[in-house]
Image (cartoon, rainbow, N blue to C red):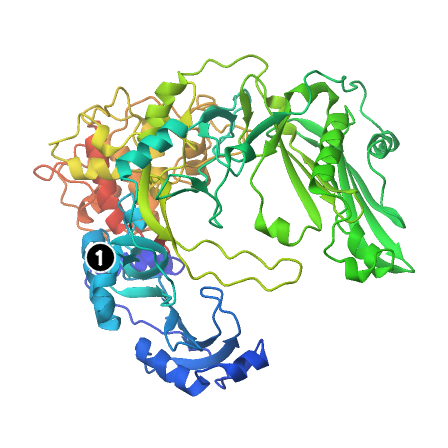
Amino acid sequence: MGVFRNHPIKLLLASSLILTSLPAYAAEPATLPANPKVSAQDNQAMENAKVSKDKALQIAKKGIDIPADYTQRNVEFQSKWWGSNSPAWVFYWDHQGPDYGSIQVVVDANSSSILNIDMYKNEYDPNATYPPKVDLGKAKDLAMEFIMKQFPDKKDEIVYDNRFEPTKPPLQGSVIYPVTYKRKVNGILFDNNEIRVNINGNGEVTGFSYRWSDDIQFPAAKNVMSEESITKLYEDQLDLSLRLIRYWGPRQKNDTDPIAYVPQTFDGTGYYGQQYFRATDGALVTPWGDMIPQTQLGLEQISDKKLGDMPAGKTLTQEQALAALRKHFSLPEDSKIINASYREENIDNPVSVWDFNWEQNVNGITRGWSSASIDAVTGRVLNYNNSDQVYYAKEEGKIPANEKTSPKISREEAQKQATELVKKLNPDIANQIYFVKMPPNPYQEANPGIFYFSFAVLQHGVTLENQSIGVSVDSQTGKIANYWFDPYNLKLPKEAPVVVNKEQAKKTYMDMVELKLTYILPQEKPSIYNKPGKSNTEAMLVYEARMKNSGEPTFLDAKTGLWTNRETKKPVSTAETISDIKGHKYEKELRLLLHYNIFDITDGKIAPEEQISRGEMIKMLMLVQNNGYPIWYDPNRAATFSDVSKESDYFGYIENAVQQNLIDGTKTEFKPNEKIDREELANLIIKALGYSNLLEVPNLFNNDLTDTASMENPAAATLVTKLGIMDTASKAFKPDEKVTRAEAAVAFYHFLSKRNQGGAIRY
């Protein structure tokens, strides 16, 4: 029995094969105090509430069945509940122990309506099986049953929202389906109210969220543009611009960053920005419901010519770097340097930098900190932060307290100052820098202590993915509070890139866009100059531009014109676009793995009957082990095998397999292009399951295979057949037979049903 002492998983497997059983032990539940207490944010509001605490508690308990083993832990009164801006009672219950659970119910203290319910139960299910007992369709049925039990009166007021559906079938049995219903008003979806039920793979409710507000006013759907008309309007106005983006996956030494076609949205970032169009006339509106005039959008060049060059030569000393900073910024009064450090970065964008930190000290008391970074070669200021100046000036009496919200300079003056600073700091690229025009932000208008400005560097029609230069100006002192420059600006293409025609790209982009008629509740504007803001209860009818959910991080590659996976760098393919698996004997298993980019695709085919190589097999195994997520290693990692370089698509997967002791890392070569046979596949699967030690136990399994004499490890072949992972023909395992992609897909599908289940995957 010593073999099993440190391998409880192996013991469980062996015991199941020899028909024995083990006892189960439960953890001791934690004990917590159970005296609910009231904490009021606003005593006056609580006294004025129309619904008492006791009455609200009765309403809460009617809203959802509180299990008998749940204890009420706390109750709060909030004068302004975030979801409705109404005064509310908030009640909490929980259940301690390994099967932890919690319930929160929010009751409107004026209207008596339930505003919010959140229920959570421990989602990890150690008994989950694969495939899950419940698929998405059954989960939707179970979720509706739960909703009808709790809120039967809402049946005709909700509509299923498929945006939250899992886009891929699960690779584990411990899975959570977030079944979401949005409120339906006049047959139109209202995004702000929803009922969401989480169903696990065994069909149990593990989470429940109810967000509802009865005081919203909805305008009638009159004189509304058709979906076809608004889609045409959107397409006509769609302006795709070129953006230099960064891969999210591994980087090789000579990798070049891709250029993507991205829509130019009003927020200046232009990357999957949320856009609303007023349903009556198609006017673009902000999240606060304000129309955006075209004059408030776009880019303005700050200089028509280059204004100078940046010095280049030896690395600057600390004093030289400080001198470069002082040319443009006055350091805080009463400050001293508390840190000065030099660093070099060679991972993503090679750069050497001096970093400085200052401490502001008045009468021996620390009042704040400031920081700056300077390029150690050119002296270009990369960032500067001194946003605490106004606060300390007020404390010292240099700025009267009653002038707290009154700007000393106008936004126009601040913009001019920011623009001049950007020119001086970047003379070599001044003619490539543009001011980003954006509509007014209510939060800035309400509290104009700091003015914020964004600038974009544009070279050969290409900008960075997000705003690349940021400046903030203190409205009280007129001083620069913050400055930020992304060194990636200097990686913009030096020559005009070769890209597909913009109209062609627009058609491809439109295939991924949908415009849906929906009600939204415009965001509440903040109070202005200390005057209370007005709670917003009037919904707006808009068309929302949404990107269809592909289930992958994608971008529209400007060079190829194809939607491309941002992690794998490969064009996006779906099981539906593959031409050689429909009707295949193992179509189900092949489709499952295709969803996780496990097969390499050539000309829309995966060639399921072709033999699979050792490199492909390891990649397949490690992707399955990692629940479909790609595996990367730092490009500085030394390669284990001489024939698997860092540039190989298999590098990260093979290195990970070595690290997990699934393959022998002491050999000099791996031979990734050799075809794999059934015996090697059996050994890999047994190692991946963690059952290798079982093979060392003599006569543990009855070996009834007829061709084990030539095998190096017949016990592995025996075990994979006993587990039903690999099949046999007339008791012959055929260890030397090569494995096709279809056969590998079947083996790994069965492998998924046998491996030790991990934590729940939330889609």
Who is closer to the viewer here, 709 or 306?
A: 306
Q: Is 652 on the left-hand or right-hand side of 574? A: right
Q: Position of residue 95 (x, y in %)?
A: 40, 76
Looking at the rendered structure, the kind of residue marked 1 is Lys
Q: Residue at x 49, y 69 (%)?
A: 81
Q: Residue at x 26, y 42 (%)?
A: 716
Who is closer to the viewer here, 239 or 209?
A: 239
Q: Which residue is mark 1?
A: 140
Q: Is residue 634 above or below residue 288?
A: above
Q: Position of residue 18 (x, y in %)?
A: 20, 60
For residue 742, what is the image quadrant?
A: top left
For residue 66, what is the image quadrant?
A: bottom left
Q: Is 208 on the left-hand or right-hand side of 370? A: left
Who is closer to the viewer here, 477 or 611?
A: 477
Residue at the far left in the pictured view = 730
Q: Quadrant of the N terminus?
A: bottom left
Q: Residue at x 50, y 40 (%)?
A: 292
Q: Is residue 382 visible?
A: no
Q: Is 451 on the left-hand or right-hand side of 200? A: right
Q: Mark 1: give few (<14), some (14-19) or many (20+) Cα within 10 Å.
A: many
Q: Is residue 689 above or below residue 707?
A: below
Residue at the far front in the pictured view = 223
Q: Is residue 449 visible?
A: yes
Q: Position of residue 511 (x, y in %)?
A: 30, 30
Q: Position of residue 551 (x, y in %)?
A: 34, 40
Q: Residue at x 47, y 70 (%)?
A: 86
Q: Is residue 320 above or below residue 141?
A: above
